[in-house]
Image (cartoon, rainbow, N blue to C red):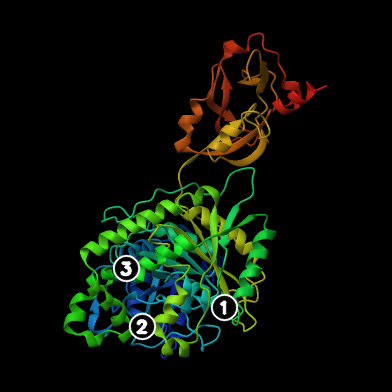
Amino acid sequence: MALHTLADWRKAYCEDGATPRDLIGRLVASFAADDTAWLLRCEPAFIEAQITRLEGIAPHELPLWGVPFAVKDNIDVDGLVTTAACPAFAHRAMRSATVIRRLQAAGAIVVGKTNLDQFATGLVGTRSPYGEVPNTFDPAYVSGGSSSGSASVVARGLVPFALGTDTAGSGRVPAGFNNIVGLKPTPGSVPMHGVLPACRTLDVVSVFALTAADAALVMSLMEGASGEPGFQRHAPRVPWLGLEGRPLRVGVPRDPGCDEDLGYAAAFEEAKARLASMGVMIQPVDMAPFDAVARLLYHGPWVAERYAIVAQLMERQPEQLDPTVHEVIDQARAFTAADGFAARYRLEQLRLQIVPLWHELDFLMLPTAPTCPTRTAVLDGPILRNSELGRYTNFVNLLGLSALAMPSGFTPFGLPFGVTFVAAPGADAALTHWGLRWEAAHAHLPLGAKLRAKRGQDLTLLKAPVAAPTLEIAVVGAHLSGMPLHGQLLERGCRLVEKTRTAAHYRLHALPGTVPPKPGLARVADGAPGTAIEVEVYEMPQADVGSFLALIPPPLGLGTVELQDGRCVKGFICEPAALEGAPDISAHGGWRAYMASLQP
């Protein structure tokens, strides 16, 4: 069986009894020597040392046991050379980046370093002295960059996942051009120690995978950026998008500006139609404020961050840089410190215009890129063609947003078309869950570069990125859906988990004199007759539990309620003294049925 996804590799080890020495040895031997996606293929001894660390550990004990992966060559791996696609910069790393050490601790095995636009400066995948990385569907077109090699080896099934980096779209554009998933975490959520930055205040390590579930698992094993300088800090959000009781509100560009001749315009319309079929509310969005943010990245002083990394090389050996990369970074000389502050002030002004949008929308769906140029077109206009690709990506990290690039369809020319879902900072877990829904609606699409005719049905999410903590609360009376106090749950962004019943040892009473009318739930003594009472279980952000408690009047409170499946959750209970003389309404099975019985 061909091994493509993490599920394939788990089955090979856990069910079929394969060993890493057999599978990875054959895998690395199959890598073509002239494949420009690779800058370094790991030697057998290096791979053997990693496999040896797994001895005595069963495959099911580590989530990535024996799984091979590739690393963009601006991320350090202990003992391997880091080049950033510049031979004059090459040096042997003495310590692995934090993300590498965490993935290896989870059982993963580095098998090679991948090509990139030099110093991660580009979205095309052609700015490398080691060769251009072609599109995996049509070599006449670009692969996208700067994480070109990582996307290529995943799309072709050489590894189930690979690491990239993302400043302006490098973890998203190559995903869209090669029919794979690109998960770009919220800046600051993933450790960056050991990663050569392009723009240190914006960069984040990204994940390329064939499925959203695989990308989510990898990110969950990397995240947590404590103990290092932090330039952006965003608290995780709850693991869902939108509010209970209404459709998701998804913004799309009012004027997408996609390439009609290439078929991208029609492909985005198809994506919108698919989105509508999923029951969401589509809202056109004026992208002007986002466009203004995007222009700050390459037409503003942030380019000076790139210069800070390569200043010595540019001054002493400018000929060692790719000419286009040199031209881009050399713009930094035109900016002053005052320009830097002015741009930062401008960014915050634009942020104030954009923040209210997240109260009107749950997330955005954007074309990952509005076009896909040929390699010849890039050669003729390297900066113009590159800048066209960043329209929907350049602003994301400047605003600290989360993003997930997903396959969406194909053009009449057979090129993949991808969309990117962009949400507020910290919404990585929520985007992952949405990505699984999108993937299920696109199961008919091929996997990667036609590795399988269909993506398949294995959409099991083993682990998602960290989310804000929540608390399950069972409501029994006026907070039930459709009841007078249900709005208190909606105001706190609660999500319905299930409609169920309590265990069969409770009694329900109608509390006299309460406004609006409320019941009191009480557990009976062991051996006393009880019944199962209708409840609804909601997931509430823990940050909102305090304000919710403040609204609960005596004699009610929150305690522990046992459900019919034996689970215990927090829920409404009543002081025993208040039940004296209160009518027992347990025979109705719940508050809703009791209230219905009072109607004429």
Q: Which mark is residue 34?
A: none
Residue 30 relative to residue 457: left or right: left
Looking at the rendered structure, the kind of residue marked 3 is: Gly
Residue depth check, mark 3 versus mark 2: number of the one nearer the observer = 3
User: Is residue 173 or residue 445 the one in the foreground?
Assistant: 173
**Residue at point 23%, 84% (across, down):** 88
At label 1, counting other C-alpha atoms closer than 10 Å, the crowd grade (few under 14, some 14-19, many 20 or more) is some
Q: CA distance from mark 1 to mark 2?
A: 32 Å
The disc, 1 or 2, on the residue closer to the chain's N-terminal end is 2
- Tell me the kind of residue under disc 1: Asp
The reply to whether residue 5 is visible in this rendering is: yes
In the picture, which quadrant includes the N terminus?
bottom right
Which residue is tagged 2?
39
In percent of width and height, residue 87 lies at 26, 84
Q: Is residue 225 left or right of residue 586?
A: left
Residue 503 placement: quadrant = top right
Residue under pointer 1:
259
Secondary structure type for disc 2: strand
Distance (Cα) linking label 1 and label 3: 27 Å
Tell me where residue 113 appears, x and y as whole percent: 36, 77
Q: Which residue is mark 3?
A: 300
Q: Residue at x 40, y 58 (%)?
A: 399
